[in-house]
Structure formats: C-alpha cells, structure tokens
Image (spheres, coloured by chain):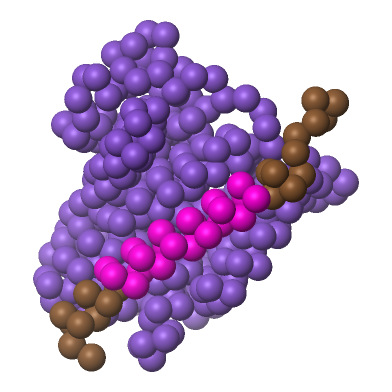
C-alpha cells in the first residue's frame, strides 16, 4: 500500500526530478519569444507558436517529440517532408504584388545583390569549422526568408533547424532596427536625398500573368533543384494575377497559410530541446545569421550606389537595402529613411519593387545554391 | 573537395548565378512589357 502511494507520488514529481538544467533556460527563451511576439509585435504569427512549442518540448517526460508524440507527428508530416514551407510559399505568392517590380525590371538586380550575404556568410561558416551542408544552412539565414531557410535546413542540416529558423524569423522582425545605421553608414546625404519620382502603372495584365510563368520556367531550367520553392511562390502569384480562381487565392493566403503557419511554428519550437539547443554552436549560428542579414543590406546598398552611378544619379541607393526578402518591412524602412532627408521623397513603391525583387532573389539564390551543390555532387 | 574550393565556388557561381538569373529575368520582363504594353483601359 505504502509502495503504491510512494510510486504514485513519484509519478507526480518525476517531471521535476528529470528536469535538466537546460530545460528551464529554454523555457525562459520560449517566454522571451512569446514576449517579443505578444508585447513587441515582432513576427507574432510565428514567434508565438515557436515560443510555445519551445516551452512544451522542454517539459520533461511528455514524449511530445518521441515516436507517436503529437509534435513529432506534425514535424515529420510537414517539416521533414518540406510540405509546410512550400504551402506557405503558395500563400506568399498569392499575397505579393510584383507590380512595382514589373514597372522597373532593372530593380531585379537589387534583389540579387541583397542575397550576397548568404554566400559570404557560407564562406565564413566554413572557415569556422562547420561542415559544407551546415554552412549552406547557416548562410541561407541571409535569405531573410523563413520558409526558404526552413526548406533548405530541414533537408540538409535538420539538427540546426531550431537555431536557423529562430534566427531567420527574429532577424526579419529586427529589420527596422539594424538596417537604418547600415544605410546611413554607406550612403552620403546627397544620395539619400535623391528623388526617384512617381511609379506609373505600366505593366499590363498579360505581363503580370506571364511573369510567374516566365520565372518558373527560366528559373526552373537554370536551377532545377530549387523549383519547388520557385514553383509554389509563382503558382500563388499566378492564381492572384489571373483573377479566375479567387477562392483558391483566398484559401492560399488565409486558411492554408494560417493553418500551416501554426503547425510550422509549433513544430519548429519543438526542435528547441535544451539538451541539443544550448551549445556554443547555436550562439555562433545566431551571430552568423545576424551577420548574413547585415551583409545583405550592405551589399544591396552598395549595388544601389553602383546603379545610381551607372544611371547618372537617378537611383536612390537606399532602395538597395530593400533588396532582401523581409517584405514589406524593409520597403517601409527605406521610405521612412528617405523621408528623413527629403520630406518630398516618396521611395515606397520603388522600394517595394526592390523588396519583391528580393523575395524572388532569395528563392532564386537558394535554388541556385542547391543546383550548384547538386552539380558539385555534394547533395 | 576541400572547404576553400567549395567556399570560393559557392561565392563565384552562387552569387554570379543568382545575379545572372535575375538579370536574364529582368531582360525578359522588359521585353514582355514591350510585347504586351499597358493600355489605359486596364
């Protein structure tokens, strides 16, 4: 009788007994993510489920991430199979207006320059001793694009998924904090004051419909390994632009995106088990991810300066900072900074063009990277 | 393949490939805008 009572009591304290020192630390990390999402409004749609998933998985003996556990089932079904990030891409494509980019297709180049940080950080990660595929996954944080980072990392370095995704989403939300000083440092006051005029609507409906098809076919032929990423975002955009499947478009940008975001967020949080997450490696990944996004901004602004020089002073280099995938935050930052120096300046639509170029650019960079890896026989 | 070769290849081919692809796309889109010009009634 006494044994049974003691056994029963033992069951009630087992959670405390099995608590590893890293678990409370990660529960605090989860609470910080919740705080950032709820109180500071930093990417709440993702940081709230990630933060909660992080808390859940750090409570011992729950078996949530063991075979048959509900988080493991979600993780295996959507993250390991890469289905979740791809479904989110359909929604992103359906939500994104590539119009400003089509008004001035040259701005596409800023979307490419805004990805250079990926490759520079990859090289740095290699120098710091990470394996090739780990370095690829760390570099991809510089895409500043959560689903792309998750897609690549879940495929090639799943053990880094928690750190990479938290870095990608947290830094995306910090764009308004770290971009302005870089923009100011790399441009002169005269450059920041350049007025680019008004964006006039000049892309026909046919052009808008053909755009996703061209990107899919050309991009797919150049970088076939990245076609799932490109194809899904362009499918979403085709549905939006053709205007005949509004039910599917609405479902993609609302119901599907919302459900998948919840499941993706909670299963990413579930990879943040303290015993595997709290390592010096995680801190290095977080630092490298931050560096990648800063380098993207710097390369975008520098490329903007080059385009300004080549165009005879017609391009405000600030819009280069929006050549990353953090849409539309980055474009808003450019608009705000531009108006600080010239209140009559209205850079928003130009920056939106650069920003949507960055969205295609980040997916294209990942696609190119995967195809180069395949070509070298590494994957 | 050693890390040095891998890193340099990724920088050159990766960055170059991304830039080249988006440049090609920008040229095609410029061509499409000319082929299908915007009409005011749109």
Work out whether A169 lies above or below A226. above
Number of on-image labels = 0
Work out whether A266 lies above or below A307. below
Question: Which percent across, then down, holds residue B25?
Answer: 56, 56
Q: Nearer the viewer, residue A112 or A260?
A: A112
Q: In which quarter of the image is residue A199?
A: top right
Q: Which of A253 and A304 is in front in this view?
A: A304
Question: Which percent across, then down, holds residue A87?
Answer: 63, 60
Q: In which quarter of the image is residue A175?
A: top left
Chain ID for purple: A
Q: Main secondary structure of the magenta part?
A: helix
Name which residue lies at 49% across and 44% down: A106
Work out whether A330 lies above or below A159. above
Q: Nearer the viewer, residue A229 or A270?
A: A229
Name which residue lies at 44% across and 56% down: A362
Query: In the figure, is residue B38 to the left or right of A123?
Result: right
Palette colour of chain B = brown
Question: Which percent across, then down, holds residue A337?
Answer: 32, 21
Is residue A300 part of the magenta span, yes or no? no
Q: In which quarter of the image is residue A90?
A: bottom right
Name which residue lies at 44% across and 23% down: A196
Is residue B18 part of the magenta span, yes or no? yes
- Work out whether residue A243 can be spotted: yes
Q: What stretch is highlighted in magenta?
A: B11-31
Where, quadrant-wise, is the C terminus of chain A in this rendering? bottom left
């Amino acid at each position: 009788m006494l044994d049974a009572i003691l056994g029963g009591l033992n069951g009630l304290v087992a959670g405390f007994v099995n608590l590893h020192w890293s678990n409370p630390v990660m529960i605090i990390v989860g609470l910080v993510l919740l705080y950032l999402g709820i109180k500071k409004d930093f990417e709440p749609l993702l940081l709230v489920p990630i933060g909660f998933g992080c808390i859940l998985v750090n409570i011992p003996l729950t078996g949530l991430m063991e075979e048959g556990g509900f988080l493991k089932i979600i993780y295996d079904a959507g993250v390991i199979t890469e289905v979740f990030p791809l479904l989110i891409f359909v929604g992103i494509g359906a939500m994104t207006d590539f119009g400003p980019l089509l008004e001035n297709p040259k701005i596409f180049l800023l979307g490419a320059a805004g990805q250079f940080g990926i490759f520079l950080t990859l090289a740095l990660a290699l120098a710091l001793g990470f394996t090739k595929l780990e370095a690829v996954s760390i570099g991809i944080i510089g895409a500043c694009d959560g689903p792309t980072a998750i897609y690549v990392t879940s495929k090639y370095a799943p053990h880094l998924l928690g750190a990479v995704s938290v870095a990608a989403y947290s830094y995306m939300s910090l764009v308004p904090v770290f971009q302005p000083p870089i923009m100011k440092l790399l441009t002169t006051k005269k450059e920041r004051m350049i007025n680019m005029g008004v964006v006039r609507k000049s892309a026909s409906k046919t052009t808008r419909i053909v755009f996703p098809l061209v990107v899919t076919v050309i991009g797919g032929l150049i970088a076939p390994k990245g076609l799932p990423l490109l194809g899904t975002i362009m499918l979403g955009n085709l549905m939006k632009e053709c205007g005949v499947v509004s039910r599917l478009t609405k479902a993609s940008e609302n119901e599907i995106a919302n459900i998948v975001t919840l499941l993706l967020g909670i299963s990413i949080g579930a990879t943040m088990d303290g015993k595997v997450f709290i390592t010096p490696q995680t801190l290095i990944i977080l630092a490298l991810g931050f560096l990648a996004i800063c380098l993207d901004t710097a390369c975008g602004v520098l490329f903007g300066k080059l385009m300004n020089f080549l165009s005879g002073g017609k391009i405000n280099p600030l819009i280069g900072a929006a050549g990353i995938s953090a849409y539309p935050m980055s474009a808003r930052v450019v608009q705000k900074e531009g108006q600080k120096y010239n209140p009559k300046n209205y850079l928003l639509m130009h920056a939106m063009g650069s920003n949507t170029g960055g969205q295609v650019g980040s997916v294209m960079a990942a696609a190119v990277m995967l195809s180069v890896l395949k070509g070298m026989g590494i994957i | 393949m050693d890390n040095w070769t891998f890193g340099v290849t990724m920088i050159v081919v990766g960055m170059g490939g991304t830039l080249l692809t988006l440049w090609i796309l920008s040229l095609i889109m410029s061509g499409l805008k000319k082929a299908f010009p915007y009409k005011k009634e749109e």
